[in-house]
Image (spheres, grey):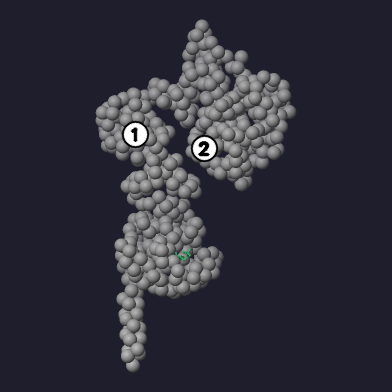
Amino acid sequence: MIKIVIAGLDGCLGSAFLGLSDLFALAHKAIIAAIPPSEAGSAADFCLVTASADGRPIRDGSGATLEVETSFEEIGVCDAVIVPSFAPGPDGKAPDMSAFAAAAAWLRRHHSRGALIGGCGSGVFLLGEAGLLEGRRCTTSWWHHEDLKKRYPRADTAWGARLIDDRRVVTAAGPLSWIDVGLHVIRTLCGQEAGRIAADFTLGETAPAKGAAKGAAYTPNVLSGGVDAFLAEAERIVRQSDAAFNAQDLARALSTSERTLHRKLKQACDESPKTFIDRIRVETARTLLETSAKPVKELAASAGFIDEASFRRAFRRYAGMAPSAYRVWAKAKSQDKAQMFSVRKDSEIIPEILTTILDTCVNGVTLADPDIEDAPIVYANKRFEDITGYQPEEIIGRNCRFLQGDDRDQESLRRLREAIKNRQPIEVTLRNYRKDGELFYNKLNITPLFDAQGKLIYFLGVQYDVSNQVRAETEIGDLKAKLQAIA
Ligand SMILES: Cc1cc2nc3c(=O)[nH]c(=O)nc-3n(C[C@H](O)[C@H](O)[C@H](O)COP(=O)(O)O)c2cc1C
């Protein structure tokens, strides 16, 4: 009999601990019903045991008491141990694992005896504590990624993977990934057919089933056949693909010809296979831009783009702005201040009349957001675009210093820096460069804007092109110098 243990640990997610029991009970029933006893073999020959360090009930993250059947020591031999995710603490991080040293040692022992060890979400940290992640490819929830890397630097932590099985160490992303881990354990220990039946019955799987027929996770027959199911399947495959994946691969993964793929996508969403693949990747990137602080280059790779340049091109085509601008825009959307200004001038949250007034100004008007890293421009009026020659998507999301090009050794800049640091108003004239490279003199007036509580909310910048004036003054200066020389 295959023995699968759920490790009961104080502070774990109650839903994971109890849900795993339900999952295995449901799977057991479904497998017995689907496979005649004569053919079942070991497919349904498994049992589930819940255990805690001392065999006493545990308290989950919300304080509820959960009964267990036995203690870790009583378990003896087992085939798999699953560690549920922990409930997030006040700081959102995984708990300090030194409190679970005994459980970690117990996991290590079972792994060395041949058991499969699975960790869900922040439960993966216990596997790290047990030394099981050393030199192994692993994953966890995206918001724990950096922390896992920091705490267990010898782990080969993958970004964005849902489930990884590296030499009997199974790690999965997300607090609810216990479903994926549970199904993976059934598939590994009880066979592909048992895994398929369990996944079809519970409809729970979100991670790809590696090596499964058609490369698919278990898509129950009841859903397949229609165009929507085809689209959903195509989308799922693209989301799990790497940068080298192309239309030909998609057709192959869907067990269809390229022609049929073309026709079906055209019919369902009016897109070519290439456009379809790019769009799904841009959508993935959009989510990553909203939810992570990853540099654009890394993010492009995670979303499946071959390089940063092709990602930037595709993103601009679909989202209408640069990735960094999108990040700023998404952040502004979720902040109160966005009710006053947004980088999207066509957004309904900008008072239209205000935009109109600002657009008719003879001066450039910009707003920089000091709450965002490197204080990027979150609003620029039409005149600023005219003065600089840049399009909105090339302005929004960048610090205005890009107008200085390589001409960074300017006395006025030092004063400007100091004033911004001290949140004081200032007026300076800077040498700036238009998009076509032409020099212009920018008389820049900066005013910090505070809210009623005295909190700095924006820097307001007013730009005035004084090139003619500066040139005239320079000419007068030159003339005077010449006259003096003659005199
Ligand atoms: C609202 C605002 C508008 C700005 N506009 C310009 C500009 O038009 N041209 C420019 O060269 N610098 C401009 N700056 C200044 C740069 O953004 C930056 O503060 C300056 O280069 C000094 O910082 P640094 O040493 O980090 O570059 C602006 C700053 C703010 C806050």
| Residue 47 vertical position relative to residue 16 in the rendered view, above or below | above
Residue at position x 39%, y 21% in the image: 221
Residue 205: give x, y in percent of width and height.
48, 28
Residue at position x 34%, y 56% in the image: 346
Which residue occupies the extreme top position in the image? 38
Residues at marks 1 and 2, CA–CA distance in whole angstroms: 23 Å
Residue at position x 45%, y 69% in the image: 409
Q: On the rendered image, what quadrant is the N terminus found in?
A: top right
Residue hosting label 2: 158
Image side of residue 265 versus residue 186, left or right = left
Q: State which image quarter holds ligand 1.
A: bottom left
Q: On the rendered image, what quadrant is the C terminus found in?
A: bottom left
| Residue 289 vertical position relative to residue 443 in the rendered view, above or below | above
Image side of residue 299 versus residue 119, left or right = left
Q: Is residue 319 visible?
A: no
Of 236 and 157, the residue lying toward us: 157
Mark 1 and mark 2 lie on one chain; the one further toward the N terminus is 2
Q: Residues within 10 Å of mark 2 (few under 14, many from 20)?
A: some
Residue 81 quadrant: top right
Q: Is residue 399 visible?
A: yes
| Residue 471 vertical position relative to residue 296 in the rendered view, above or below | below
Residue at position x 43%, y 74% in the image: 428
Residue 101 quadrant: top right
Residue 165: give x, y in percent of width and height.
53, 28
Residue hosting label 1: 246
Amino acid type assigned to the residue bearing label 2 in the image: Ala
Residue 129: give x, y in percent of width and height.
65, 36
Label 2, secondary structure: give it. Answer: loop
Q: Which mark is residue 349?
A: none
Residue 122: give x, y in percent of width and height.
59, 37
